[in-house]
Image (cartoon, rainbow, N blue to C red):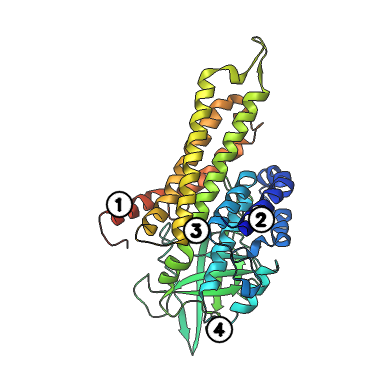
Amino acid sequence: MTSTGDQWIGRAEALAREVLALHAEDVDRQGRWPGNSVAALAASGLLGLTVPASFGGAEEGPRTFAAVTRILAEQCASTAMIYLMHICATQTIVAAQAFSRREELLHSVAGGRHLNTVAFSEKGSRSHFWAPVSQALAEGGRQRLSAEKSFVTSAGHADGYIVSTRSAGATDPMASTLYYIPRDTPGLSVSGPWNGLGLRGNASAPLRLESVELPAAHRLSTEGEGFAMMMNAVLPWFQLGSSAVSVGIARAATQGTRDHMLATKLEHLGQPLASLPNLRARLAQMQIAVDTQQAFLEHVACRMESPGPATLLVLLESKAAAAEVALHVTDLAMRNCGGAAFSRHLTVERNFRDARAGAVMAPTTDVLYDLVARTLLDMPLF
């Protein structure tokens, strides 16, 4: 990690402690957009963390990004997910060198004036986000798109959406094209509310596109090459960032459990909960699991920065492994904290619910297990 990276990590720690932690409980309870926290991210320069320096950004790499995202998730997983999807979308713009608005948008992102997100998933293809069922229609030299996008983080709040669609005239669902669509585009609307079990503040709502015009100037990938851009520019950052969110949630649950064990007494014995060896054993299991997974997260980030033959494999492994650790650790946290957690008196209950998202968020853990095995067996992934 560079000294500059350490500075950004320190900035994220201060922001998470001083802003995100103050609003996280209310964001979860009300299911509201964490506007204060996102504004703080913008003001801090963190929205431009991975933007090249030539556009005013920090030009930090995967290791700094993973650390920052994990730190945010320890205090507010909803805000961390918003941040993750913004970085994924921004990296798509960074990769789209022929995109006419690239310089303008990256300067805006680096200046904290623009929030991006990704709109890939559709109800028809479920967790196979790489295969849109929507298809662009060519009409007299123009292209238009009608689609129902599902689970769009920051729906209704982002300034720009990276949208996928099957290319006009294509029969292969993976012959897709990516477009940038501004929030004020006619025909673009949020088509329903978000009321999730966890990550309740990330506004992961359905997005409707009704005959939205797709100008050539807004095309990010070359025609029919959206799948390759998803795999190369989006998926690695998403896998790493999603893993970081899961690790952050698990670490928060571990810390919350420790605090509860130290602060709560068995008054009839005159001893804290920490006096019970079975609870201490569970806490130890949680800490070991989190530390092990964080070490793997840092290893994956290093592999991203110095790609090699094993990079794809560890990227595929990372989200599945971290999601499962988060499920296990938060389950142990609920057991250790008992009725105090079940009655929602502790933050570990929020951690427990937030952790459920990682396993079912595309690509799901089950899909990733199959992709990992296919990689090991030298089989085609898709």
Relative image position of residue 79 (x, y in whole percent): 64, 52
**Disc 4 crowd, CA 10 A, few/some/many (<14, 14-19, 20+):** few
Name the side, left or right, on which 225 lies relative to 69. Answer: left
Mark drawn on residue 177 = none
Name the side, left or right, on which 72 lies relative to 132. Answer: right
Q: Measure the C-alpha gap from mark 4 to mark 2.
A: 37 Å
* Point 66% across, 22% down: residue: 264
Which residue in the structure is indicated by mark 1?
Answer: 373
* Point 45% across, 51% down: residue: 299
Q: Which residue is situated farthest in the front direction here? A: 3
- Label 2 secondary element: helix
- Label 1 secondary element: helix
Relative image position of residue 270 (x, y in whole percent): 67, 11
Relative image position of residue 94 (x, y in whole percent): 55, 72
**Disc 3 crowd, CA 10 A, few/some/many (<14, 14-19, 20+):** many
Name the side, left or right, on which 222 lies relative to 82. Answer: left
Q: Measure the C-alpha gap from mark 1 to mark 4.
A: 40 Å
Q: Indicate which disc, 3 or 2, sits on the residue closer to the N terminus.
A: 2
Q: Measure the C-alpha gap from mark 1 to mark 2.
A: 39 Å
Above or below 137: residue 257: above
Q: Which residue is situated farthest in the top direction here? A: 268
* Callout 4 touching callout 3 (CB < 8 Å): no
Q: Measure the C-alpha gap from mark 4 to mark 3.
A: 26 Å
In this view, the residue in front, 118 or 276, is 276
Q: Nearer the viewer, mark 1 or mark 4?
A: 1
Which residue in the structure is indicated by mark 3?
Answer: 238
Q: Indicate which disc, 1 or 4, sits on the residue closer to the N terminus.
A: 4
Which residue in the structure is indicated by mark 2?
Answer: 7
Relative image position of residue 286 (x, y in whole percent): 51, 33
Q: Indicate which disc, 4 or 3, sits on the residue closer to the N terminus.
A: 4
